[in-house]
Image: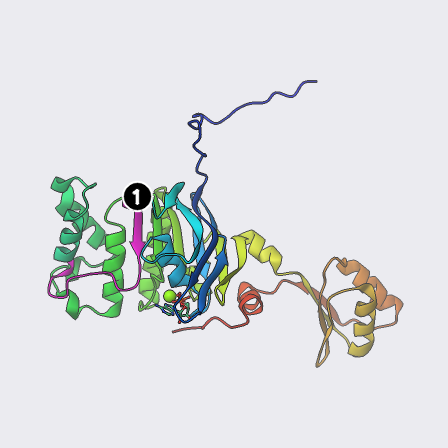
Amino acid sequence: MTAEVRVTDRAEPQAGARPATAAITTTGLTKRFPGGQVAVDAVDLDVPRGSVYGFLGPNGSGKTTTIRMLLGLVGATAGTHELLGVQMPRGGLDVLPRVGALVEGPAFHPYLGGRDNLLRLDSGDRTAPGRESRQRVDLALERVGLSAAARKRYRKYSLGMRQRLGLAAALLRPRDLLVLDEPTNGLDPQGTREVRNLLREASTEGATVFVSSHLLSEIEQVCTHVGVMSHGRLVFQGSLPELRAAAGLRVRIETTRPEAASEVLRRLGTGKPELRPNGVVAELGTVPSDQVTAELVAHGVDVRQLVVERPDLEELFVGLTGEGFDVDE
Ligand SMILES: Nc1ncnc2c1ncn2[C@@H]1O[C@H](COP(=O)(O)OP(=O)(O)O)[C@@H](O)[C@H]1O
Ligand SMILES: [Mg+2]
């Protein structure tokens, strides 16, 4: 029998050009601020095209600094990075029009309304057709729920409204990549839900979405991939199922003889057993759970209940970052 090899790629990449399967890659990306503090420490990001990538980490873990480097707003101390297959910051003029961004403190005019601010921004975009400007702006305002406040001056906007206007600016035109730094900051639960829907929509329309948050729960539902920052380092990167798998299975045993059960687990080679008031808990590792049951029974340990469970993502994050994510702002 012969195996048939099919080339399914429709377009051959041009000689010398790599097919860009990643929307963002960084290699050893590092930022050391004057004074010696390393805010971002040799970060290797790999953001697949088409993904909704949650860039997670507690406050101060280096998310904003990374994003500012990605967009070329601040220089890197070391390392390289590419956006949509284009080397940055060199290729910024070519690639940045394809990237919608929301970063801290966008330059909006305080005495202009939201709508006029967007019109101003839009007219500065030399790659956008000018005659559709009003239509584009009104659509963007509508998408972020600011139509009614379109004339209100920016300086009178609440934090949530400012955030929405920043998002509208990022969404003014269809983009191949959205880079959004904490877009849910300052928004109430309803606003947060709306942002999640916007991210989903943008993704459905074909954009890769890179979105940071210090609140796992706020973006977990929309992400396909996550990267977790802690103290400037990327401590986890992968798909959401990979993240779930990284949270190893645990066995929880209810018994009147927790000490004896611990001893059995130790001999089986599970993770370190932890005593609980009426039982014991341990990481299973590679030990099959039915072997645990059999050994407990063989050693005469009464088992009232044996549960195999996976820690939830929140617990995993505490383990990865050494800090809990805020439950709420
Ligand atoms: N301009 C700066 N000068 C000096 N230190 C900075 C500067 N910007 C950020 N940092 C420090 O770098 C670290 C990472 O900050 P940041 O990237 O804002 O984290 P995050 O966005 O995850 O909250 C923090 O310790 C912060 O104090
Ligand atoms: Mg930040």
- At horizontal 20% and vertical 49% (from top left) the residue drawn is 139
Direction from residue 176 to residue 281 in the image, left or right = right
From the top left corner, tell me how far across and down residue 220 is, in percent.
46, 59
Question: Quick one: SS at disc 1?
Answer: helix
From the top left corner, tell me how far across and down residue 214 is, in percent.
43, 66
Q: Is residue 216 above or below residue 83?
A: below
Q: Which residues are magenta?
A: 95-114
How is the protein colored in the picture? rainbow
In this view, the residue farthest toward the top is 1
> Where on the picture, by quarter, is residue 307?
bottom right
Compare residues 66 and 157 and report the one nearer the observer. 66
The kind of residue on which mark 1 rests is Arg
Compare residues 117 and 15 and report the one nearer the observer. 15
User: Which corner quadrant holds the N terminus?
Assistant: top right
- Using the rendered image of the protein, determine whether residue 61 is visible from the camera's viewpoint: no
- At horizontal 31% and vertical 47% (from top left) the residue drawn is 99
User: Which corner quadrant holds the C terminus?
Assistant: bottom left
From the top left corner, tell me how far across and down residue 241 is, in percent.
56, 52
Q: Is residue 101 magenta?
A: yes
Direction from residue 238 to residue 272 in the image, left or right = right
- Using the rendered image of the protein, determine whether residue 274 is visible from the camera's viewpoint: yes
In this view, the residue farthest toward the bottom is 277
From the top left corner, tell me how far across and down residue 32 is, in percent.
43, 64
Residue count near mark 1 (Cα–Cα under 10 Å), binned few <14, some 14–19, many ≥20: some
- At horizontal 16% and vertical 69% (from top left) the residue drawn is 155
Compare residues 39 and 199 and report the one nearer the observer. 39
Q: Is residue 280 magenta?
A: no
Q: Is residue 113 above or below residue 87?
A: below
**Quarter for ligand 2?**
bottom left
The residue indicated by pointer 1 is 98
